[in-house]
Amino acid sequence: MRALLFCLVAVLFLGAECIWAEDVRIWPLYYRNADAASGETRQEIFWPLYSRYAGKDLSVQKILSFQNEYPRQFPSQQYFLWPVSGFRWGEGLHDLWIFPFLWSASERDRGHLSCFPLWICWWRPGQLHLNIALLLQNSWKEQGQSHYLFPLLWSRWYANQHRTGYSHGLFPVFRVALRLDEPGKGEAAFTRRYASFYFFPFWQGSCGQDASAGQCAYLHHWHGLLPLFYTSSRTEVDGKSKERAAAVRNENIFWLFPYWQSDRTHAPSENPPGTRAELEQISTAAFQLDHRRRLLPPFYWQQKTRDYHLGSRESTAEKEQFWLLPWWMNYRRDTAGELRSNWVFPAQWGTSQEKDQQGLTQTKTWRAFWPLYRSGRESERTAAGDVRLDRKSLWLFPWYSSAFTGP
């Protein structure tokens, strides 16, 4: 072994005069190549232990690294076990990393510095972001600040040309928030507002906006004591279209466990409100469009729907369904006629009345106690009230009879 090392040293000593020549190869100990025309030089010592590349505007040194592409914006570059680590720098910029723990980079007025997972910091013009231990996120901007301790705590506030607001909270116990949108300088008048306050189990809030180009005014309020109680009121303007005139709609929801109800009202308006303050003062109680009741579990259930004539308060159609265990009721009325049926199983009874295109009125009544008994009657009258057809039937198990009068 000593003889081998002595021979290697002797070879290097004897070839010292040619080491700095343009092309030297002592494989595998040493390699050097210089190109005078391009100004490039390549040098290797115990490759791949160490290698070096130099050009007119670039210098690269590598230790146990094999890449052959180098970003030209970094005149000086060093790599060790690429891509695990490296260091590159140039005029006004640098890039340093030791994967996955350290990364530092900068370019003029922006940069990044992180020591994973202890902290991650990066900055841009007018903003700075800092993350500590992956859980504490902080951000500073010209418009405001935000701070988050995931997933429990947050605090954020901001203000710019179009929006002002804040939000603070402690999940899942507390939250308070406000957001106000206003028009910028030279823009059309437009204001939107949102506010919310939550302190478990109490929750209240409101949101709304004023009318603007392409936007209709609306206003929404809510209060709650979760999950037992909740009440909500929403009033909005339904814009004018080819099919209908402008109108104001209102919906009220009330929940008190296990009871729930919903009411909707509708009022045509030739000059609909344009602001949240005007919506708050308007009354739409004259028109009932939808009426619903629930009692959970489903021992009680009610739903009522009405349609109104566009130019008056006259109701043109109505539909109602009612359930109170074990009773079920269904009611319908429209231009074609009227229907009412009831069930208390196994009993059933009901009536219906319909008009056909010829002006004849058809009336039906029935009673039943399934499967033992059923009776029914069908009659048809003219517009003058004369009976044109009359049919009766009776079923009393096992006996059945029927009678018919008519043409």
Image: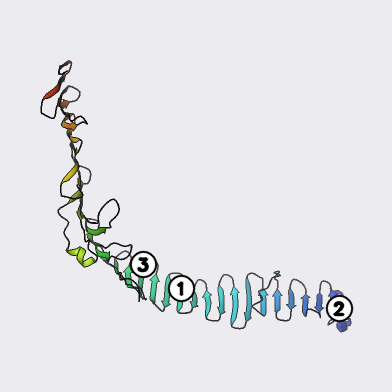
Q: Position of residue 399 (x, y in %)?
A: 16, 15
Picture quadrant where residue 54 is located: bottom right
From the image, state whether disc 3 or disc 2 is nearer to you.
3
Q: Amino acid at mark 2?
A: Phe
On the image, numbered disc 2 is attached to which residue?
A: 6
**Number of residues whose C-alpha sits closer than 10 Å to that of mark 1, classed few (under 14), some (14–19) or many (20 or more):** many
- Mark 3 and mark 2 lie on one chain; the one further toward the N terminus is 2
In this rendering, position of residue 317 left or right of residue 194: left
On the image, numbered disc 1 is attached to which residue?
A: 131
From the image, state whether disc 1 or disc 2 is nearer to you.
1
Label disc, if present, on residue 356 of the rendered structure: none
Q: Position of residue 388 (x, y in %)?
A: 14, 23
On the image, numbered disc 3 is attached to which residue?
A: 152
- Residue in view at x 60 percent, y 77 percent: 95
**Number of residues whose C-alpha sits closer than 10 Å to that of mark 3, classed few (under 14), some (14–19) or many (20 or more):** few
In the displayed structure, would residue 18 be above or below residue 390? below
Give me the C-alpha separation between circle 3 and circle 2: 69 Å
